[in-house]
Image (tube, rainbow, N blue to C red):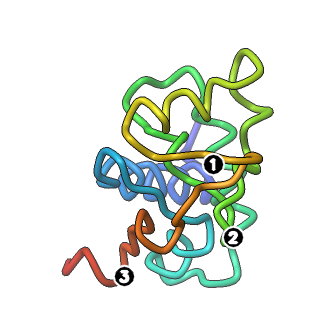
Amino acid sequence: MPESKNDNFFERVYDVARLIPNGRVTSYGAIAKYLGAARSARMVGWAMNACHGRDDVPAHRVVNRQGLLSGKHHFPGSNLMQQLLESEGVEIEDNKVVHFDTHFWNPSVELDF
């Protein structure tokens, strides 16, 4: 079966997500913008949801544009996303990244390829 357009986009999303440094977070929209699909933040979210069970994609480092752990319900257990971020030194309060601007990693700025 040929690869679909979504499969290719999802793999490109995963390639970017793999580059997010430990202790940093980015947003669905920032990944979409970097990939030249600025209006596809929701599709980046679908990609993150579809990658669960893949240890090679740090989906826990992708949050919404305000720093909310909007994808946490897709992780097993009640607080796994938060626990993973906290284990990397990211403080979470009320399901939101504390000092989001300090932890934010913007692929459009950080990556030069």
Q: Position of residue 50 (x, y in %)?
A: 66, 37
According to the image, label 3 marks what residue? 108
According to the image, label 2 marks what residue? 66
* Type of amino acid at the residue the image marks with label 1: Ala
Foreground label between 2 and 1: 2
Distance from disc 2 to disc 1, alpha carbons, whole Å, reads 19 Å
Q: Residue at x 48, y 35 (%)?
A: 86
Please, is residue 37 above or below residue 81 in the view? below
Q: What quarter of the picture does the C terminus occupy?
A: bottom left
Q: Tell me which label, 2 or 3, sits earlier in the chain.
A: 2
- Left or right, 111 with respect to 85, comes to left
* Type of amino acid at the residue the image marks with label 3: Ser
* Residue at the farthest left position: 112
Q: Which mark is residue 113?
A: none
* Type of amino acid at the residue the image marks with label 2: Gln
Foreground label between 1 and 3: 3
Q: Are marks 2 and 3 in contact (CB under 8 Å)?
A: no
Q: Which mark is residue 47?
A: 1
